[in-house]
C-alpha cells in the first residue's frame, strides 16, 4: 500500500501547465467546485480565493518534492523559532517566485478580472510588529531560495498586532481580523498536535545518591495544533514550511457546569486556551499580561521542540546525531525558554543523562541577539517561573550551578563577573535573565550588524564574551530582493533589466553593473520617471485614505518604523517645526518643497510613543493648513503601517530617514529597502548604516550626529542638554513652540512633559544631534536642487545594495553557524 512508502519513494507529480488558457479554466473550476460560485455572481474576493487555490496547487507539487528530497538525502534541517513572522500578502509573492506573474495576469484578464484589484484584497498576515518579524519572513524566503531545508516555527495569532486607527490624532488600537474569512494558504495538521503543560508540581523519584528521575505533573494542559503554510523560494526551486501553532483546550466545554446553568463558566477552559494565541504581544504592564506573554513563549517553544524531536526520531534511531541533523535558531530572547525545555524533554522524557543532554542542547541551538537595550533583553520573576514552569526553574538552577561552578574553578572568575554571567539577576527582585540563558545554551551567538556585534561584546554580554570569547559572531541582516525590488517596484526592476540584463534576478550583487549608468543622463531621466510614477501612486493613496493632497514633484521624505524614542521620530518632528519657522520667516529663500511622511505603531502601553504620534498629527494639522507655507512643507502620518503599505511607500521615497541614536539600533532593514529602491539615506552611524556607508560610498549617503562612542562618552560625562538647547536658536524656538501649545491649542500643556524630557535628560540625544541633523537636511536640499547629482547618487545606492540581500545573510548562517 502507498501508506507504507517513505516520502522519498513516492512518484513525482506531473508538472502543471502555465498556459494562460489552462490557468483560466482552472480558476473557473476552483470558483465553481471549491467556492460554489457561478462566474456571473462571483465577487472579487471569490476570484482572489480561486486564484490562490490554483497557484497553491503548483506550490504544493514543489512543496512535496522538497520534502521528499530531504528524506532521501538526509540533509540537515534548520528550524527558525520566532515569536513574529511579518509575512504580508502571499499571493503575489508566490506567483512571482514561481515565474507565473504574466501568465496569471493574462488568465485573469481573459476572465474580465483585474489581478491588481483582487491582490489588494488579500489580508496582511498580522503576525509581527516590525523589523524582527519582517526579517524572519525574508529569511524564510531566502532559505527556500538558497535551498536550505527549513521550518519556521511561530504562533498563529488570531488577531496578531492591532489595527491602528486615529481618533483626533491619537492612536486607537483595534483587533486585526486577518483570519476572519479563513486563510487559503494554510493546512491544518491534526496529526501534529502536542500537549503543553503549565503549573503543577515536580515529583522526584529516587534518592540523591541514585539516578534521580523527575516527573512534572502540570496542573493545566492545552493542545498545540499545527497549521502549515508553504514558503516558496525564487524560481520555485524549493518550498519550505512555516508551521504556526494554535492553542486548543483539551475539553472544549465543561458539560456539568453548562447543564447546571453556568453557561459562561462552562467555556472557561476553552477561553483560557484560546487566549494563548489570540493576540501578539499582550500588554505586559500588569502581572496578568506578563504571565500571558510567558505562557505564549513557552507554548510555542515546547510545541516546536516536541515536533522537532518527533521528526528526528522518525528518521534516526536516537539523539546522538541531533546536532548533525538539526540546527535551531532562536530569533531574539522570546524563545529562550526552549533551552530549558529541550533539557527537560531530553532528560525527563527521553531518559538522557544531564551532561549528555546539555552537550546536545548547546551544540544544536544558536541565538540571534537583536537589541542592546537592557530592558528588551527579557527577564522573568523567579516566583512566576517557579509557579508556571516549576520543572524548568529547577533545570535553570541546575544549568546555572554547572556554569558558575565551572567558571569559578576553571576560569578563576571573580564575584562581580559571576554576578554578571549568572542566569539569576540578584539586583532587587530575583529574575531569570533569558538573554544569558540563550547565550549560555547556544554554541553561536550572533549580532545583526558589524557595529551591533562589537557593542554586544562591550556592553550587554561583556562578561559572557570574556568567558566564551569565540561564541559571538556577526551576521549582518539582509532583505529579500524578490519582494523589496522585483514585486514592490516592477518599474525599476524593468528599467534595470533593460540596462544590465537579468543576472541580478538570481544574484543581487550583479546590480553593481548599474554603476556604469549613474552618469548617463538618459538613464537618469528614466530612473527619475520611475520614481515619479511610484510617488504618484503614494500620493493617490494618501488622497484616497486621508483626503490630503501632496505634490509628487516635492521631495518625499519618509520615516516608517515602530514608534520608539530611540528611533527618534521626535527629532524629525522637531526639525519639521524648525523648518516651518524658517520657511515663514524667510519666504524669499529658495526652499526645496518637501513632504515628511511618517507611519508606524506604538506599543499600547508606551505613553511617550503614543504622544509622539499625537504630536505628528497635531503638527501636520497646523502646517498643512497654513497658507503662508505655500505648500513648501507638508507632514503626513499614515495610519496602520503594515507590509502592504511599506510596499507602496518604500519605492516612492526620495529620502530615507534612518536617524536612531547611535549605538541603539541593532541593524535596521528599512534602510536597506529604501536604498535598494533608489532613495538617499540621511542617518547616523548606527546599525547597518555603518556598512551601507562602506558599500555606497560616503558621497552617496548623508551622515550626521554623534557616533556610538561619542554618545556613550557624553552620557558618562554628564550630558547637559539645557546648555545645548540654549545655544541653538532654532532648537530652542522649536521646543518652546511645541511645549507652549502652539500645535495643541486645545491642551496647551499636552507636550510639555515630552519637551521637559529633552531639557532635563535627553537620553536619546535629540538636543545633542539636532544642529547636526538640521544642517544635514539643508545639505540634502542642496543636493535635491541639482537633479543630475541627486539621481546619480540614488542610482549608486540601488547599484551597490546587492550585498544586503538576505540570500547572502542566509548563506553565511548556513556555512558558519548551521553547517547546513
Image (spheres, grey):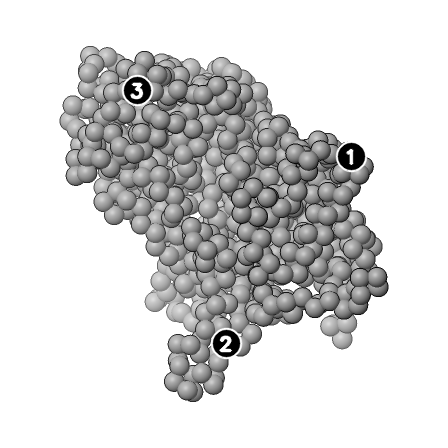
Q: Earlier in the sequence, mark 1 or mark 3?
A: 1
Left or right of 293, for residue 731: left
- Would you name the residue on which mark 3 appears? 731
In x, y percent, where is residue 371? 54, 37
Report the residue at 71% width, 33% height from top.
Answer: 414
Q: Nearer the viewer, mark 3 or mark 2?
A: 3
Give how far apart the Cα atoms at labels 1 and 3 are.
Answer: 52 Å
Q: Is residue 268 left or right of residue 238?
A: left
Residue with the mark numbered 2: 252
- Tell me whether the residue at label 1 lies in contact with that at label 3, contact meaning CB atoms closer than 8 angstroms: no
Callout 3: SS: helix
Q: Is residue 394 visible?
A: yes
Disc with the residue nearer the chain's start (3 vs 2): 2
- Number of numbered callouts drawn: 3
Where does the N terminus fall, quadrant-wise?
Answer: bottom right
Residue 78 locus on image (x, y percent): 69, 49
Residue placed at 54% from the left, 20% from the top? 709
The quarter of the rendered structure image containing the C terminus is top right
The secondary structure type at the circle numbered 2 is loop
Name the residue beneath numbered marker 1: 411
Name the one closer to the observer, 620 or 519.
Answer: 620
Amino acid at each position: 500500500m502507498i501508506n507504507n512508502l517513505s516520502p522519498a519513494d513516492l512518484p513525482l507529480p506531473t508538472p502543471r501547465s502555465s498556459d494562460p488558457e489552462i490557468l483560466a479554466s482552472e480558476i473557473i473550476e476552483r470558483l465553481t467546485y471549491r467556492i460554489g460560485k457561478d462566474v456571473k455572481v462571483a465577487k472579487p474576493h471569490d476570484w482572489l480565493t480561486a486564484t490562490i487555490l490554483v497557484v497553491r496547487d503548483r506550490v504544493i507539487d514543489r512543496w512535496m518534492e522538497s520534502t521528499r528530497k530531504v528524506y532521501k538525502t538526509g540533509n540537515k534541517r534548520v528550524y527558525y523559532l520566532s515569536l513574529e513572522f511579518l509575512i504580508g500578502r502571499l499571493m503575489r509573492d508566490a506567483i512571482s517566485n514561481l515565474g507565473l506573474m504574466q501568465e496569471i495576469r493574462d488568465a485573469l484578464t481573459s476572465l474580465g478580472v483585474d489581478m491588481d484589484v483582487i491582490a489588494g484584497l488579500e489580508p496582511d498576515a498580522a503576525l509581527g510588529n516590525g523589523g524582527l518579524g519582517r526579517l524572519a519572513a525574508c529569511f524564510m524566503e531566502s532559505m527556500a531560495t538558497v535551498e536550505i531545508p527549513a521550518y519556521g516555527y511561530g504562533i498563529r495569532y488570531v488577531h496578531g498586532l492591532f489595527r491602528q486607527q486615529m481618533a483626533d490624532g491619537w492612536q486607537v488600537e483595534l483587533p486585526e481580523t486577518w483570519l476572519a474569512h479563513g486563510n487559503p494558504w494554510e493546512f491544518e495538521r491534526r496529526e501534529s498536535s502536542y500537549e503543553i503543560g503549565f503549573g503543577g508540581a515536580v515529583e522526584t523519584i529516587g534518592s540523591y545518591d541514585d539516578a534521580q528521575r523527575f516527573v512534572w505533573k502540570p496542573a493545566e494542559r492545552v493542545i498545540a495544533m499545527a497549521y502549515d503554510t508553504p514558503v516558496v523560494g525564487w524560481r520555485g526551486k524549493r518550498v519550505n514550511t512555516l508551521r504556526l501553532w494554535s492553542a486548543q483546550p483539551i475539553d472544549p466545554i465543561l458539560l456539568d457546569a453548562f447543564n447546571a446553568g453556568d453557561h459562561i463558566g462552562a467555556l472557561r477552559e476553552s477561553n483560557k486556551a484560546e487566549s494563548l494565541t489570540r493576540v501578539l504581544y499582550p500588554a505586559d504592564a500588569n502581572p496578568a499580561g506578563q504571565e500571558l506573554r510567558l505562557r505564549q513563549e513557552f507554548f510555542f517553544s515546547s510545541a516546536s521542540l516536541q515536533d522537532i524531536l518527533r521528526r528526528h526520531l522518525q528518521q534516526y534511531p536516537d539523539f546522538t546525531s541531533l546536532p548533525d541533523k538539526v540546527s535551531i535558531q532562536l530569533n531574539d530572547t522570546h524563545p529562550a525558554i526552549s533551552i530549558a525545555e529541550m533539557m527537560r524533554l531530553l532528560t525527563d522524557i527521553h531518559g538522557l543523562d544531564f551532561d549528555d543532554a546539555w552537550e546536545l542542547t548547546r551544540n544544536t541551538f544558536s541565538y540571534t541577539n537583536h537589541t542592546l537595550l537592557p530592558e528588551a533583553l527579557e527577564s522573568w520573576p523567579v516566583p512566576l517561573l517557579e509557579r508556571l514552569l516549576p520543572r524548568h526553574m529547577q533545570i535553570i538552577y541546575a544549568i546555572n550551578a554547572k556554569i558558575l561552578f565551572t567558571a569559578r574553578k576553571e576560569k578563576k572568575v571573580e564575584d562581580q563577573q559571576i554576578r554578571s554571567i549568572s542566569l539569576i539577576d540578584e539586583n532587587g527582585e530575583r529574575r531569570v535573565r533569558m538573554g544569558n540563558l540563550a547565550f549560555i545554551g547556544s554554541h553561536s551567538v550572533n549580532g545583526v550588524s558589524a557595529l551591533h556585534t562589537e557593542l554586544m561584546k562591550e556592553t550587554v554580554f561583556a562578561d559572557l564574551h570574556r568567558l566564551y570569547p569565540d561564541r559571538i559572531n556577526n551576521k549582518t541582516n539582509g532583505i529579500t530582493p524578490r519582494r523589496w525590488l522585483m514585486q514592490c517596484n516592477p518599474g525599476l526592476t524593468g528599467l534595470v533589466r533593460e540596462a544590465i540584463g537579468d543576472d541580478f534576478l538570481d544574484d543581487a550583487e550583479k546590480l553593481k553593473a548599474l554603476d556604469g549608468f549613474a552618469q548617463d543622463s538618459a538613464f537618469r531621466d528614466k530612473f527619475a520617471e520611475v520614481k515619479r510614477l511610484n510617488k504618484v501612486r503614494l500620493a493617490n493613496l494618501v488622497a484616497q485614505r486621508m483626503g490630503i493632497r501632496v505634490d509628487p514633484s516635492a521631495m518625499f521624505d519618509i520615516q516608517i518604523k515602530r514608534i520608539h524614542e530611540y528611533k527618534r521620530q521626535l527629532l524629525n518632528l522637531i526639525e519639521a517645526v524648525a523648518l516651518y519657522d524658517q520657511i515663514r520667516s524667510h519666504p524669499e529663500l529658495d526652499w526645496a518643497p518637501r513632504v515628511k511622511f511618517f507611519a508606524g505603531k506604538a506599543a499600547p502601553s508606551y505613553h511617550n510613543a503614543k504622544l509622539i504620534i499625537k504630536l505628528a498629527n497635531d503638527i501636520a494639522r497646523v502646517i498643512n493648513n497654513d497658507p503662508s507655507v505655500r505648500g513648501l512643507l507638508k507632514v503626513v502620518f499614515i495610519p496602520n503601517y503594515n507590509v502592504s503599505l511599506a510596499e507602496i511607500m518604500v519605492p516612492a521615497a526620495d529620502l530615507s530617514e534612518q536617524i536612531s541614536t547611535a549605538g541603539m539600533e541593532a541593524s535596521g532593514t528599512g534602510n536597506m529597502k529604501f536604498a535598494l529602491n533608489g532613495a538617499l539615506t540621511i542617518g547616523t552611524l548606527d546599525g547597518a548604516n555603518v556598512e551601507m556607508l562602506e558599500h555606497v560610498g560616503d558621497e552617496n549617503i548623508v551622515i550626521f550626529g554623534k557616533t556610538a562612542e561619542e554618545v556613550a562618552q557624553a552620557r558618562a560625562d554628564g550630558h547637559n542638554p539645557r546648555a545645548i538647547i540654549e545655544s541653538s536658536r532654532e532648537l530652542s524656538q522649536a521646543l518652546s513652540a511645541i511645549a507652549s501649545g502652539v500645535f495643541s491649542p486645545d491642551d496647551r500643556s499636552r507636550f510639555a512633559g515630552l519637551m521637559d524630557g529633552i531639557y532635563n535628560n535627553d537620553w536619546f540625544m535629540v538636543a545633542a544631534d539636532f544642529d547636526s541633523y538640521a544642517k544635514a537636511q539643508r545639505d540634502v536640499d542642496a543636493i535635491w536642487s541639482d537633479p543630475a547629482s541627486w539621481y546619480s547618487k540614488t542610482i549608486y545606492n540601488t547599484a551597490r545594495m546587492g550585498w544586503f540581500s538576505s540570500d547572502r545573510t542566509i548563506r553565511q548562517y548556513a556555512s558558519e553557524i548551521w553547517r547546513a
